[in-house]
Each structure stands twice: as structure tokens, then as C-alpha cells.
Amino acid sequence: MSQSDMSQYDPFERGPHPVGVRTGEWTDASRDRTLPVEIWYPASEAHRGEDLDEARCDRYKPMPMAPEVFQSAVRDGEAQTGARPLIVFSHGFGGERRQTTHLCTHWASHGYAVVAMDHVGNTALDMMQAAAAGGAATPARQIAQFIVDRPADASFVIDRALAGESGLEIDAERIGISGHSFGGWTTLATTARDNRIRAALPLAPAGGQTPLTPPGFANDMADALALTWERPVETLYLVAEFDTLLPLDGMRDLHSRTPKPRRGVNLLNADHFHFCDRVEQTHDLFKTLGPMMVGSVEGAPDMTEVLAGMKASAELCPGEHAYALLQGLGLAHMDACLKDDADARAFMAQDLVGVMADRGVAVEML
């Protein structure tokens, strides 16, 4: 392939398809568990431009008391026909299914079906309600239940998507998974258990050993994570240099234990919430109100003390740098693995530090 051929592949650019979005509730009768899901997909040509027009794109409230925000997708737009590769997205501890729409809509604009679920019991609203009810720490037994529920939720979503519940045709041979923080842990844990997954993109995942794991504290996430899958699953870690909640030591630990083929890219001068929408707003809100938003975890370090060391967003790299990293490398990784795209594979084989530097984004390889 010539250099001119590869230069036409640009994973940083929005794709050729308008993006639609649907919301559903999928019930796993075997677990008596109903999950709200958000579904992004390539929409018909009739919706051209609507997804990028703030006056016509989808607006929603992440929580009942939150201000309205928008995502670059058209609500209930007519879907294009044809089988699509599937990517499942898992939110973080105290997050919600629409926490990273800039990545999910980017994938959909390039032809993917993307489904994100609320991990019921562990969403932002669940955690805030629990904290407001008395401020008690989340007990270890509840964390243990989240550890059981989350990979099962992800596999259930794959089941239902393949069964047609999304209203989209899914290619069963092209399935990937991604997620942030506890959702990054969920990405790794589900990959270890569900052989249908061909590509993994953990974003600042939990489960690694770090200095924030005090002596005697049972790191249940680490204990439950078996990084021993025997089939080849291409895994790309995207992590943050100054991650306050899940320090970089833990990312290096996880990355070193992940079966090959694996790669990792560290976004310099970034923190934990650079993997969410509205980076600066989300980061500063959590820095100020984190203990009120998610409470604390039994046996874990005190959240107030942890957040005292968190920089203000103005001291960190801008959110646009994170969006470029996630959208560009996140898409190229999935294109290479799920579409067998030779241009994407050649793109990912480049010097990624140099690729990102050309866009003004400072990274290093893990």
C-alpha cells in the first residue's frame, strides 16, 4: 500500500454516516434484572446534518436534577440497513450509559452499532441516592455484587443485540468492547469470559495494584480479574498520566499482565475524567462534589483525601486532546480488528507518539 493510499485513512474525522440514537430497556429474566440501554447506529441519508445541528440533535438529562446536554445523534432516526459490527460500552463506577457519547457517536458515524447499558445499582443516580440517604460507605459485599453483575450485563447485551432487540442487524463475528474505569475493568473481565469478543479497548481501567490500595484492603476487582484468555484478542489501553483515582501504576500492572497482542497509550497531563464527555466540567464537578456524588467505598482510601491531590482542569491538557485520542485511536483499533481494514492496521503500526504529536497531543507508549 502506498503512502498516498494510507493518507486517505483518517480516523480522527467524523464518518460518512449520520448517527441515530435509540433508548430501550432490556430485561434479563434469568437474573430478574432490567437494564436501560442506549443504542447508536448509522442513520439514513434523510437525517444528513441533523446529528451535528445543536438545534435538532438529541438532548437529554443525565440525571433528573442535571442540566440538559446534547449528543451528536438524531433521536429515533431511521436506521440504515445491513449487518453492522457491534461495540459494547460500559460506564464507570457511579457513571451512566451516555458518559462518553463523543466516542460512541464517532464509532456509529463510521458504520458501527454501539450499545451502552446502565449497570443498575452502580449508576450516578444510584450512588448519589445512596450517599444522600446517610452517606455510609458502599459495603464490600455490594462491590462484590457489582463485580458479578457487570460482565454478565455486558454479555447479556451482546445476546440481545444478536437476537435483534436493538432493531439492527449485527454481525456476530465482529464484536468489540470498551469501557471506562470500572467499565474498563468490565471490558477486561468480559473479554476473559466471553469468547465472542474480538477487540478490547479499556479506558483507564480499574483492577490494577496501585499505591492507593492500602495494606489489608482486599482489592476485589483485581482478585476477580483473570487476564488469561487463550484466544487472540487485540487490546488497546488508553490511560491518563495523572489519574488521581486509578494511578498509572495500576494501568502498567494490568497492561503487563494482558495477553498479547496488546498496546497502551498514555495521555500526558491528563486525569481520570479525560475519558468522559465535557471533560473540564466533569473533572471540576467531581473534584468539588465527588464524595457527595459517589460516597465512599468500605475499606478504600478516603475520597476527600484522594481528591485533595487532584489538579484543576485548567492545569491539565484540554478535553479536545482526549477526544482526538479516543476518537482517532479508538476507531482505528476497532477498524483494524473488527473490519480487517488494512489502512487502519497500517495506521496503528505507525509511531503513535508522532501521530498524536502532529495533532498537538502529547502521549507516550506504556
Image (cartoon, grey):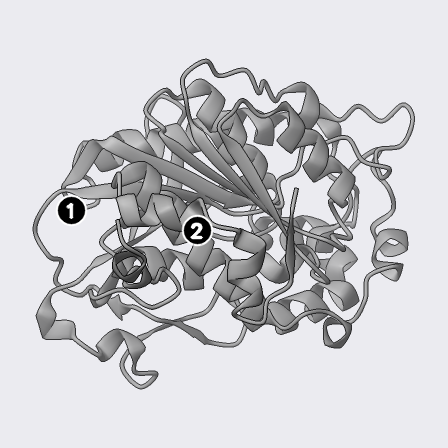
- Res 157 visible: yes
Q: Is residue 274 left or right of residue 72?
A: right
Give the residue at the far front of this rendering: 2
Q: Is residue 194 above or below residue 315?
A: above
Q: CA distance from mark 2 to mark 1?
A: 25 Å
Measuring from the top left, give residue 117's x and y in whole percent.
41, 45
Measuring from the top left, give residue 198's x and y in whole percent.
35, 30
Q: Is residue 312 left or right of residue 283?
A: right
Query: Which residue sits at x=26%, y=34%?
Result: 174
- Res 27 visible: no
Query: Which residue sits at x=30%, y=82%?
Result: 53
- SS category of the residue bearing label 2: helix
Measuring from the top left, give residue 160's x and y in whole percent.
25, 33
Give the residue at the far bottom of this rendering: 55
The answer to which of 32 and 295 lies nearer the viewer is 295
Query: Which residue sits at x=21%, y=79%?
Result: 49
Task: Name the amino acid, label 1.
Answer: Gly
What residue is disc 2 on? 330
What residue is disc 1 on? 167
Query: Which residue sits at x=63%, y=67%?
Result: 282
Mark 1 burial class by Cα count in 10 Å: few <14, some 14-19, many 20+: few
Q: Is residue 303 left or right of residue 96?
A: right
Q: How many marks?
A: 2
- SS category of the residue bearing label 1: loop
Task: Name the amino acid, label 2.
Answer: Gly
Q: Quadrant of residue 84?
A: top left
Measuring from the top left, give residue 119's x and y in whole percent.
49, 41
- Mark 2 vs 1, N-terminal side: 1
Mark 2 burial class by Cα count in 10 Å: few <14, some 14-19, many 20+: many
